[in-house]
Amino acid sequence: MDKDTHHILVIEDDASVAAGLVTGLKTAGYRVDLASDGARGVEMALAQSFDLIILDLMLPERDGFDVLEAWRDRLSTPVMVLSARTDLEARLKSFSLGAVDYLPKPFWMEELVARIRSRLRIREDEPHRVISWGTVKVDLDARTVSVGDSDVELTSHEFNILAFLVERPGRAVSRRQLAENALPESGARYDRTVDSHLSRIRSKLGTECSGAIKTVWGVGYKFEAESES
């Protein structure tokens, strides 16, 4: 994969630092999206696919530690912390919550780009997490779904729900669990909203989904297909 196809999310509230990051990363050949607070950053990362995330710790709405906690078990994108905090406690906590690198501010853009390139090379060598059954293929890292040779267009919320289920084969998952883990905090998180999303997922996957995502009456849903991942 060429570096100009890599997509990076920057979560930084300081306007001048954010502008420098966006400009520097674009000059280095990357596509860049920006979130200026933690809550928005959480939603953006869960709504679309990024190759790497650069995260400040001292953010409005939700701080960087809270953001990392929100992504735990829900996001495989590598996260690099970029923070003015230089204490060991902040570094260790970041790594314990899933960060793959930690660069203190102030920093040199050249070093940041070198670290990004190194991390992306590692990521390219890692196999994508793919779950398949029948002719259905769900690429959890690329956030794509296909049936046979045809791509299936799911919304970000639909993909989040499907991914949450297929990663837990054989386990009954409640509607509340799906709503809290797959839908944004700022949106509707009702049982009927989850049911509507599942109905559309089943419709889009067609007969291949029959018997794979089962309704567990009084609880929620369960994925039971023979996975080939």
Image (cartoon, rainbow, N blue to C red):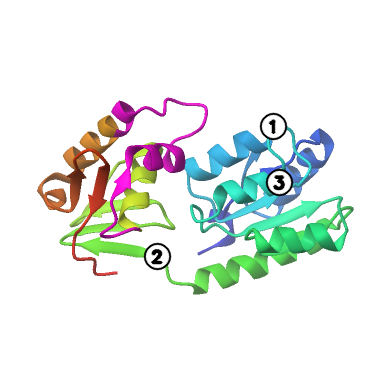
Q: Is residue 175 magenta?
A: yes
Q: Which residues are magenta?
A: 168-194
Q: What is the tally of numbered marks visible in this picture?
A: 3
Q: Is residue 16 left or right of residue 72?
A: right
Mark 1 — residue?
Answer: 61
Mark 1 vs 2, N-terminal side = 1
Q: How far separated are the C-alphas under marks 1 and 2?
A: 31 Å
What residue is rendered at 54% in x and 62% in y? Answer: 2
Hey, what amino acid is under mark 1? Glu
Q: How far separated are the C-alphas under marks 2 and 3?
A: 26 Å
Percent coordinates x, y for residue 147 in the rendering: 20, 53
Mark 2 — residue?
Answer: 129
Mark 3 — residue?
Answer: 64
Q: Is residue 164 magenta?
A: no
Where residue 207 is drawn, which disc sits there? none
The quarter of the picture where residue 152 lies is: top left
Q: Nearer the viewer, mark 2 or mark 3?
A: 3
Q: Are marks 1 and 2 in contact (CB under 8 Å)?
A: no
